[in-house]
Image (cartoon, helix red, strand yellow):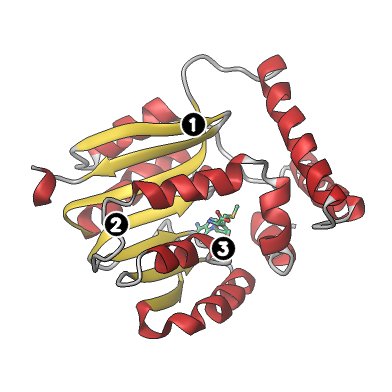
């Protein structure tokens, strides 16, 4: 099973199980991405979501910004099928597109957002990917990246276990509340473990410092780390111009 097969196999249950198995910072992180979009709710602007999965974030933005238009992009057809159904109600405010982020040139837009995707992209491909994103942004536009990243000295063992404690508490609460069964949660973690053991779970450890450097080299004018809970980190990167200058 490749990473692609993994996303195909989890697509159907993704919206229900991901907020449970990905820890309490999954939904908190998405909400923070929404809050980092530098527009007022009644402003018209356009955004692109890279690696949208089932388009949870695109839907959240379209709901919060009723005049915004969004394009949800992903490589996995099973994810996109759900995204398409979910976004159909938004008419021409929403578009869904199948593409590989490693080659994709986003259309001109005001914001690019992405959540929990870039750690699947190989580090050597990141500079050109940031460049294609900065090229697409209008003056003053921004890239808001939520992903797993390291910061500073590595921690793994005891600090990492504190994170897992919160994940287990979160899953236990969801199971007690009838949102998922123990078997479903166990099966998701077992699948991930199996893929890791077989070397098929392609995840890279990007450091926030290197990502920020890479963004600056790719013509982002101002880059900041604005939120972090354990490894889940949000970087906001602006290109020059617009009302902020
Ligand atoms: C962990 S899911 C995150 C989905 C969604 N952004 C969220 O926060 O729930 C990762 C997504 O990235 C997509 N993906 C991974 N690598 C990709 C690539 N190179 N091009 C396009 N999509 C990719 C997968 O298909 C999957 O839908």
Q: Nearer the viewer, residue 181 or 103?
A: 181
Mark 1–mark 3 CB contact (< 8 Å): no
Mark 3 crowd level (few <14, some 14–19, many ≥20, 10 Å Cα): many
Name, please, the residue furthest toward the right: 183
* x, y percent for residue 216: 24, 35
Q: Nearer the viewer, residue 187 or 130?
A: 187
Left or right of residue 93, residue 202 in this image: right
Left or right of residue 91, residue 25 in this image: right
Rendered residue at 84%/46% (across/down): 190
Give the Cα distance between marks 1 and 3.
22 Å
Look at mark 2 in the image and give the residue it sits on.
111
Give the Cα distance between marks 2 and 3.
18 Å
Look at mark 1 in the image and give the residue it sits on.
228
SS label for mark 1 = strand
Does the numbered disc 1 mark a residue whose Cβ is under 8 Å from ligand 1? no
Rendered residue at 34%/56% (across/down): 112
Left or right of residue 237, residue 177 in this image: right
**150 up-or-down from 243: above or below:** above
Look at mark 3 in the image and give the residue it sits on.
53
Of tags 1 and 3, the one toward the viewer is: 1
| Residue 5 appearing in the image | no
Q: Quadrant of the N terminus?
A: bottom right
Does the numbered disc 3 mark a residue whose Cβ is under 8 Å from ligand 1? yes
């Amino acid at each position: 099973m490749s990473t692609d097969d993994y996303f195909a196999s989890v697509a159907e249950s993704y919206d229900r199980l991901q907020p449970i198995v990905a820890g309490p910072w999954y939904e908190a992180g998405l909400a923070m991405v929404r809050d980092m979009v530098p527009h007022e709710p009644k402003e018209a602007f356009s955004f692109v979501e890279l690696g949208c999965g089932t388009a949870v974030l695109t839907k959240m933005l379209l709901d919060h910004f009723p005049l915004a238009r969004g394009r949800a992009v992903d490589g996995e057809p099973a994810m996109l099928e759900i995204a398409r159904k979910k976004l159909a109600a938004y008419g021409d405010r929403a578009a869904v597109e199948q593409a590989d982020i490693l080659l994709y040139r986003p259309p001109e837009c005001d914001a690019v957002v992405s959540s929990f995707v870039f750690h699947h992209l190989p580090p050597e491909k990141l500079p050109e990917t940031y460049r294609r994103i900065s090229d697409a942004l209008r003056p003053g536009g921004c890239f808001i990246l939520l992903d797993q990243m390291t910061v500073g000295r590595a921690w793994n063992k005891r600090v990492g276990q504190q994170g897992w404690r919160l994940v287990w508490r979160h899953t236990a609460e969801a199971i007690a509340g009838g949102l998922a069964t123990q078997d479903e949660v166990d099966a998701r973690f077992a699948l991930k473990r199996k893929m890791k053991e077989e070397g098929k779970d392609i995840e890279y450890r990007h450091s926030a410092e290197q990502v920020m450097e890479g963004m600056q080299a790719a013509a982002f004018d101002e880059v900041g780390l604005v939120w972090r809970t354990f490894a889940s980190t949000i970087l906001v990167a602006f290109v020059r111009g617009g009302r902020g200058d």
